[in-house]
Amino acid sequence: MENTMDTCKCNTQIRNITVKKHGTVIIHDVSLDVHHGEILALIGLNGAGKTTLLNAILGTIPYTGTIRFMDSKGKKITNPHIGYVPQNMVFDRSVPVTVEDMICANMSGYPVWLGHKKDKILKAKSMLRRVGGSDSLLKKSIGSLSGGEMQRVLLAFALEPMPDLLLLDEPVSAVDRKGIEVFYDLVTSMRINHQMPVILVSHDLSHVAKYATRAAFLDRTVIVSGDVKEVLKAPQVQEAFGLKLSGGAE
Amino acid sequence: MNFMYSLIDNILPFEWTQFEYMKNALIGIILITPLFGLVSTMIVNNKMSFFSDALGHSALTGIAIGVLMGIDNYVISMMGFALLFALCVSSVMDSNISSADTVIGVFSSTGMALGIVLLSAAGGFAKYTSYLIGDILTVQPNEIKTLFFILIAVVIIWILFFNKLLITSINENLAVSKGIKVNIVKKVFVIIVAVIVTVSIKWVGVLIINSLLVLPAAAARNLAKNMRSYHVLSILISIFSGISGLIISYYMGTAASGTIVLVAAFIFFISYLLNRVHVKA
C-alpha cells in the first residue's frame, strides 16, 4: 500500500476528515490522496459514508479536517472547480427546463428566461458532442431524458468549466448496460487526455476493477486503500462484499 | 400621473375607465401582476406555495404590530415582520427535517392567530377585515410610484441572479459544485417574495394573495416548453387575469381581487386540459 501521502504530487489531499451528524459520527479520520490522471474508487457497503465524504469535499456539510487542492505543478488552488455528477438526480420531472436552459445557465450570466445567445448555443452543442450527446438533446426538457442521456448532460455540465476534480456518485445507476460502457469510456478519456483526477463512488465492483486505477475501501474510515487490484483482493473487502472476485474482477 | 390618465382615456375610452380610482387600479395592476407572474415561476418550481401562503398569513401580525406601535404606515411593520418570518421559515425548510410542512403550518397559523388576537385587542378586528380580501381600488398615486420602483428592482435582481437560482432549484449539490452560494441565493429569493407579499397585501388580501403567487406559473407550466416560454406565459397570464378580473369586477360589482383569482384559476383549468390533450395526442 501507499506510504508516500505527504510527499506525492497529488491533486487532492484529504486529511483527517470527520463528519458528525446529531452527535453521531458518520465518518472519522478519513485521509486520502487523489492524483492527477487517476480514478480513485470509493467502495463500501451502504452507510459506510461514501456519499458523506463526497458531500464534505463538495462543501455541503460541515466537517473537521482539511481538504486541499493542488494543480499539476503542486501549486495550491484556492477556489477549485469541482465537477459533480450526482447519483439518480432527484428533481421535479415536470419542470419546464430544457437541456439548453440548464447548460446555458451554468456557463453564462445572461438570464435564460430571456433566451439564449447564439454563441452560447454553439458552445452548448460542442459541450454535448464532447460527451457523445447529439444536438437534438438541447431542446429536450430535462425531465424527459433517459437515464443515459441525463448522465451525459450532467457530465457535460460537470466539465464546464474544466474541473480540478471530478466527483462521480454512482453515476450509472440509472443507465443501461451499453450506456454504462460509453459513460466510463468518456470518463477514462477525460482522465487520460486532461490528466483529470476523478473520485468514483460505485457499488459495482466489476466497474471499479475495470475503470478505476486506485481504490479505497470505506467503513466509516478508510480500511484499505491503494492500487485497485490489491484493494479488491484485500480480505476485508472480500469479506464485506461476500464474494471471491474470480468472475467480475477482470 | 396626468399623462397616464389621459393615455388611458385615449386608449380605453370605456365606462369603467372614467373614474380616477379605476385608472389607478388599472395602473397598479399593470405594475404588480408582472411581479406575481415573475416570482411565481420559481415559487412553483421550488414547491414553495405553502411557504408563500404562510407569509401572507403572517402579514396580519405585521399589521397588528404596526397598530400597537402606533405606526401610521403598516407597510413598515409588515415588512419587518415578514422578513423575520420568511428567514425563520426558510431556515426550517433548509434544515431538511421531514416535517418541514408541519412546522410551516404551525408558523402560518400562529402568524394569523397572533394577528387576529392583537388586532381585536387593539380595538376590534372589524376595522381590519379589509386586509383579508384587500381592495385594489384604493391604490393611491404615490403607491403606484413605489410599485414602479419595486418592479424595476425585482426585474434587475431577476436578470442578475436568475441563472444561479435556476441551478439551485434543479439540484442544490449541483449548484454548490459550481461555487454558487446556495444559502444566499435562497435567502434573496425569500426576501423578494416577502417584499412583494407585504407591498401588495393591502390590495389583494391575506386570503388570496397566495393564489396570485401560484396560479400564473402553475398554468404556464402546463403549456411551457422551456424557461423563456414559462416566464412569458406566466407573466402574460398574470397580467391578463389582473386586467380582465378588474373589468369584470367593475361590471359585476364583485371584489376585484377575488375576481382576478377566479380568472387565473379558469386559465389554469384550461391549460390543464390543453396539457392533457397534448399528452394523449
Image (cartoon, helix red, strand yellow):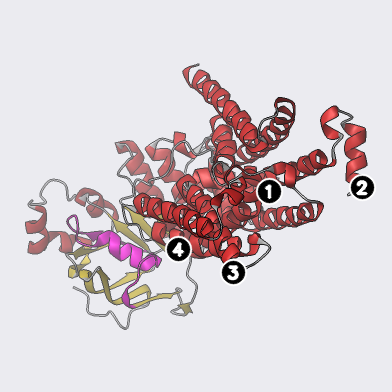
Along the viewing direction, whichever of B151 and A66 lies nearer the viewer: B151
Chain letter for the residue marked with disc 4 in the picture: B
**Disc 3 and disc 4: Cα gap in Å?**
22 Å
Assign a secondary structure to mark 3: helix
- Check the image and report above or below for A228 versus B204: below
Query: What residue did someone put label 2 on?
Result: B2
Q: Nearer the viewer, mark 4 or mark 2?
A: 2
Q: On the same chain: label 4 and label 2? A: yes
Q: Amino acid at mark 3?
A: Met
Given the image, on which type of amino acid does mark 1 rest?
A: Asp
Q: Which residue position holds label 1?
A: A119
| x and y, in percent, of residue B65 in the image | 55, 64
Q: Is residue A54 magenta?
A: yes
Which one is earlier in the sequence, the residue at label 3 or at label 4?
3
Q: Nearest to the eye among marks 3 and 4: give it.
A: 3
Q: Which residue occupies 49% across, 76% down?
A: A78
| Mark 3 crowdedness (10 Å alpha carbons): few <14, some 14-19, many ≥20 | few
Residue B182 rendering spot, x and y as whole percentages: 49, 62
Residue identified by numbered label 3: B69
Q: Chain of mark 1?
A: A
Q: Which residues are magenta?
A: A37-65
| Residue A133: % across, % down | 49, 40
Label 4 and label 2: CA atoms lie apart by 43 Å
Judge by depth and name the residue closer to the eye, A177 or B149.
B149
Magenta region includes residue A158: no
Give how far apart the Cα atoms at labels 3 and 1 are.
56 Å
Label number found at residue B88? 4
Q: Is residue A227 left or right of residue B49?
A: left
Position above or below: A237 against B200: below
| Callout 4 secondary element | helix
Amino acid residing under circle 4: Cys
